[in-house]
Image (tube, rainbow, N blue to C red):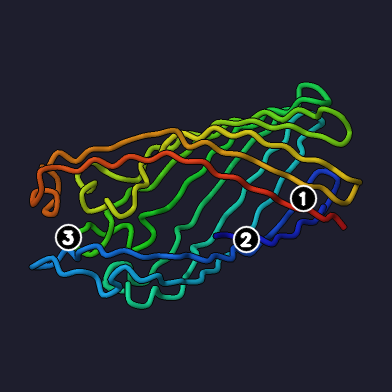
């Protein structure tokens, strides 16, 4: 669960800057066996634990002219409190830094097209960078690309749609050890919109479909993989988001 209270400020008619705080609540439970001799069960034993995390984000947008604009943002690593009894599985949990760069083009007053690149630095966090045999996940950095379209239906209603693709951070040779975290999804489709009650108040909504993707470890990967006959992980899902905005 994530909340991002944020503020922005128009430095000039062309340049805007902003900052926000990432406030996270993570819930976790499993009875997974540890990758140790004898495969003992985790101390958590399926009981629910909650951890809280925080991080920061800064960004800027520059309007080159009436039709073109560029923007960039940087999100810091997000540090969490520990997961109590699950420290034997996920010690020193953090979320990685992110960097975004985007460009927007407005061919008409009603239509806006956007293209976005995002880097997610999984290898900057020890837990994700280390191999499973070293107590980590063995992930690689992600490079994602997104494209979107926005249409102003009228003065009050704006509609949006988009697509995003990013290769999974999992390598095939660590799939077995990552069965706990099925982050094999790669393609997202989104629909959304914004309704403005007045110049200062609006309500935004979005619905995101994560297309199904699967990844297989055939049993010839790392040490943990070779102890089994193979593992297949698949994932698909839906996400919904609602945002209430106040402008001062």
Residue 217 left/right relative to 111: left
Q: Secondary structure at mark 1?
A: strand
| Residue at the image point whose x is 61% and y is 51% from the top | 73
**For the residue labelled by badge 3, is the local secondary structure a helix, a strand or a loop?**
helix
| In-image side of 45 versus 80 (left or right) | left
Circle on res. 66: none
What residue would you read off at disc 2? 3
Mark 2–mark 1 Cα distance, whole angstroms, equals: 22 Å
Mark 2 vs mark 1: give the one in front: 2
Q: Earlier in the sequence, mark 2 or mark 1?
A: 2
Q: Residue furthest top?
A: 107
- Image disc number at residue 133: 3
Quarter of the image where the N terminus is located = bottom right
* Relative to 226, 55 lies left or right: right
Q: CA distance from mark 3 to mark 2?
A: 34 Å
Residue 238 percent across, percent down from the top left: 52, 41
Instruction: Please report contact status of discs 1 and 3: CB closer than 8 Å, yes or no.
Output: no
Report crowding for label 3: few under 14, some 14 to 19, many 20 or more residues within 10 A (C-alpha): some
Q: Nearer the viewer, mark 1 or mark 3?
A: 3
Q: Which mark is residue 16?
A: 1
């Amino acid at each position: 669960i994530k909340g991002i209270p944020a503020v922005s400020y128009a430095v000039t008619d062309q340049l805007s800057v902003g900052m926000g705080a990432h406030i996270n609540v993570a819930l976790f439970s499993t009875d997974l066996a540890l990758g140790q001799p004898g495969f003992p069960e985790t101390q958590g034993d399926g009981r629910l634990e909650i951890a809280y995390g925080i991080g920061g984000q800064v960004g800027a947008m520059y309007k080159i002219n009436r039709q073109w604009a560029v923007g960039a943002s940087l999100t810091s690593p997000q540090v969490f409190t520990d997961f109590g009894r699950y420290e034997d599985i996920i010690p020193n949990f953090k979320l990685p830094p992110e960097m975004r760069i985007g460009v927007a083009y407005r061919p008409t007053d009603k239509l806006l097209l956007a293209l976005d690149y995002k880097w997610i630095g999984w290898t900057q966090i020890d837990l994700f960078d280390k191999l499973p045999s070293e107590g980590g996940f063995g992930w690689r950095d992600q490079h994602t690309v997104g494209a979107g379209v926005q249409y102003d239906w009228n003065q009050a209603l704006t509609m949006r749609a988009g697509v995003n693709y990013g290769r999974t951070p999992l390598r095939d040779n660590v799939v077995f050890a990552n069965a706990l975290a099925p982050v094999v999804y790669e393609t997202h489709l989104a629909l959304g919109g914004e309704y403005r009650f007045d110049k200062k108040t609006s309500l935004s909504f979005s619905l995101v479909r994560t297309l199904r993707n699967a990844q297989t470890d055939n049993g010839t990967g790392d040490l943990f993989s070779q102890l089994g006959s193979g593992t297949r992980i698949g994932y698909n899902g839906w996400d919904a988001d609602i945002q209430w905005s106040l402008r001062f």
